[in-house]
Amino acid sequence: MNVYDSARIAELLGGQGYQTVDDPVEADLVILNTCHIRDKAAEKVYSELGRLERIRRDRGRSGAKQFLIAVAGCVAQAEGVELVERAPFVDVVVGPQSYHRLPQMLADSFQSHAARVDTEFPAESKFDHLPDIHAPPGAAGAFLTVQEGCDRFCSFCVVPYTRGAEYSRPVAAVLAEARGYAKDGACEITLLGQNVNAYHGDGDDGTPWGLARLIEAVAAIDGIARVRYTTSHPADMDDALIRAHGEVAAMMPYLHLPVQAGSDAILAAMNRRHTADVYRRIVERLRCARADLALSSDFIVGFPGETDADFRATLRLVEEVGFAQAYSFKYSPRPGTPAAALPQVPEEVKRERLAQLQDLLDRQQRAFNVAFLGRTVPVLFDRPGNRPGQLLGRTPYMQVVHASADATLMGAIKAVEIDGVGPKSLAGRLSRQAAA
Ligand code: 5AD
Ligand code: SF4
């Protein structure tokens, strides 16, 4: 979602005469769009700010033009004025719901030295105050935020505090944006939301639409060949959405469905509001709807109170379900969240459990990828490769594929025969067979 927000900020400031540059040394303004989900991400902001302050100091010595530093995103939201106290050289602090106000804040900041801080949850939706966005030229796919915020309050998570209450964009706005991307040449759309399957945007008839209906409408747009959505909460997987996996041809057979843990006691303490068996049943129903569906997930190890037996329940769930890919983290206590106040699991226990879980997940991912050797799969080419004459693309399962392909195939879906499996990607050659 930060990638999407950054693109919208760039588009907004483009209208003010700004252009993006590749190196902060050449910039008049640097915006750090930040993440607060775990301590490591939040701390990175301060090391990055230190680097920017040095650039500014050098700039001052050379008498070159002004260099503004802005912090956007969830660290800005969570820390607000504290951020300016810790890094007094920051000019602008703007939360994720108010970045449409950046042009005014920047103009004010160029005038005076006092830092501007805006971490309000404004009554107006930023989406109503942002210019239309375009897919970058040649982009094969586009992200599209349809939902923001979260009302679920998992006990470890800062999102309900930093992104605020659940908000769904109206159907008409989402479809207009999707049509725009299709016109720009994008053939894959990823619908985004912190809790995207809780989507309930107003339709033109005034009734709320669920995510399944929205997906059907996006998939029906001319030129859209692939639709994905992320991130979902298991308890919001309704029947219509599960059915859509089998019925909407453009829906990719791959779903990121975080489970976090396999022990019911830990799931309850996390306030996830479902058991491990409920998750298993949802997976079964999804696979009934779409037999070739593969799953990805998020896991947290070392949540307060997690015993060895609880952790083994997570390993068991992973073994039973089988994941094509996953993200796993040591629990990181976040300020203001209920779980941060509980007695903590020692660091070395977390480290050991994470290593063990990642070892299992890595083996599953490798087995999943190796099974593609010799298969021909549709690949959407979306980036130039490192070597000339090479393109990178994605399979329906999000695996990265390297292939020798002409640059004119950027943005096209072509059949590729997989002939190599690396640790992070597949290799293949264009098949003579037509793209599936
Ligand atoms: N500690 C560790 N991981 C976390 N996540 C969210 N909050 C925390 C935390 N406090 C993970 C969850 C979530 C993903 C986006 O980040 O697994 O699904
Ligand atoms: Fe955070 Fe997701 Fe839970 Fe919402 S559902 S509180 S975003 S982990």
Image (tube, rainbow, N blue to C red):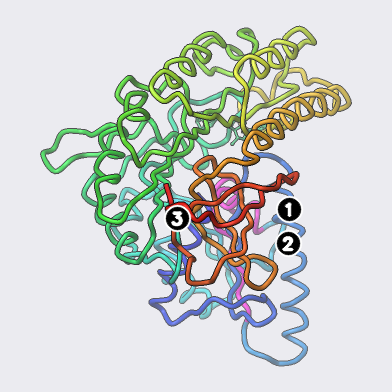
Element marked by disc 3: strand
Dot 3 or dot 2, earlier in sequence: 2
* Structural crowding at the residue carrying mark 1, measured as other residues with C-alpha within 10 Å and reported as few (<14), some (14–19) or many (≥20): some
Element marked by disc 2: helix
Judging depth in this view, the residue of 10 and 410 nearest the camera is: 410
Q: Which residue is mark 3?
A: 413
Tag 3 near tag 2, CB within 8 Å: no
What range of the chain is rendered magenta?
A: 67-84
Q: Which residue is mark 1?
A: 44
- Label 1 to label 3: alpha-carbon separation: 37 Å
- Label 1 to label 2: alpha-carbon separation: 6 Å
Q: Report x, y in % for residue 252.
A: 43, 39
Tag 1 near tag 2, CB within 8 Å: yes
Element marked by disc 1: helix
- Label 3 to label 2: alpha-carbon separation: 38 Å
318 versus 28 height, above or below: above
* 352 displayed left or right of 291: right
Q: Residue at x 37, y 50 (%)?
A: 122
Judging depth in this view, the residue of 294 and 116 nearest the camera is: 294
Residue 119 is covered by the magenta coloring: no
- The amino acid beneath tag 1 is Lys
Q: Residue at x 24, y 43 (%)?
A: 217
* Structural crowding at the residue carrying mark 3, measured as other residues with C-alpha within 10 Å and reported as few (<14), some (14–19) or many (≥20): many
- Res. 48 mark: 2
Q: Report x, y in % for residue 297.
A: 59, 30
Q: Report x, y in % for residue 345.
A: 80, 20
Tag 1 near tag 3, CB within 8 Å: no
